[in-house]
Image: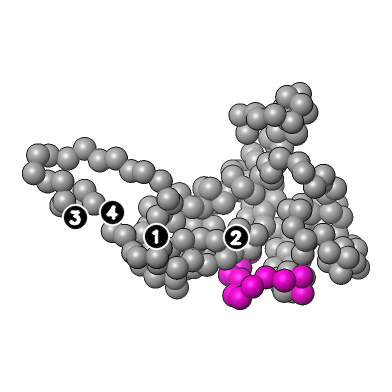
Amino acid sequence: MRPKWSSFGINSTRRVWRRRNAAYGPKNTIPTVKHGGGNIMLWGCFSAKGTGQLHRIKGTMNGAMYRQTLGENLLPSARALKMGRGWVFQHEYDPKHTAKATKEWLKKKHNKVLEWPSLSPDFNPIENLWRELKVRVAKRQPRNLNDLEKICKEEWDKITPEMCANLVANYKKRLTSVIANEGFATKY
């Protein structure tokens, strides 16, 4: 799950080259909105076969809502991606993800979950997809929250299976790199 998506920009500095006396022309400025313009929360998944569903979270996510989101999105995504039965689910070490009720729900649904130490670095490969999505959405400059949701879903669906497969294929390299560097920073 991605905590928040801002409706305006990717929170980074942009530089432009411009002609003299054109500093404030529309092509050389980036519109801003007081108080950030709002945000949405999204849940998404992917595998080496491509992206699964992208779902907008409305309200505050709690354990019950998380399990409902998994039921309505994770399992249908696994079926649509033709994952079969041998896949392993990875999610973050958030209390609603590790709650007893969530663990029991996943076990009841016969989902294997990747064991993950609580204080490990966050190098879940979905973070790379969130960044890719953020860059793509910023280029389209959504005007409001409904536009933001629509654009996020359109761009999520455009992420190629090849990109997803590459992230999964490189996962072992990430893990090996972190272990070799004794948990300190790596290029990932």
Callout 1: few (<14), some (14-19), or many (20+) C-alpha neighbours within 10 Å?
A: many
Label 2 – label 1 distance at C-alpha? 16 Å
Image quadrant occupied by the C terminus: top right
Instruction: Kindly identify the residue that appears in the image at 67 percent across and 70 percent down.
Output: 61
- Which badge, 2 or 4, comes first in the chain's sequence? 2
In this view, 30 is above or below 80 = above
Residue that label 4 marks: 30
Callout 4, which amino acid? Ile
Q: Nearer the viewer, residue 88 or 23?
A: 23
Residue 21 relative to residue 125: left or right: left
- Which badge, 1 or 3, comes first in the chain's sequence? 1
Q: Which residues are magenta?
A: 52-64
Callout 3, which amino acid? Pro
- Which badge, 4 or 1, comes first in the chain's sequence? 1
In this view, 144 is above or below 94 = below
Callout 3: few (<14), some (14-19), or many (20+) C-alpha neighbours within 10 Å?
A: few
| Secondary structure of residue under mark 1 | loop
Q: Farthest residue toward the front?
A: 35
Instruction: Kindly identify the residue that appears in the image at 72 percent across and 71 percent down.
Output: 62
| Secondary structure of residue under mark 3 | helix
| Secondary structure of residue under mark 4 | loop
Label 3 – label 2 distance at C-alpha? 32 Å
Q: Position of residue 137 (x, y in %)?
A: 44, 56
- Which badge, 2 or 1, comes first in the chain's sequence? 2
Residue 67 relative to residue 36: left or right: right
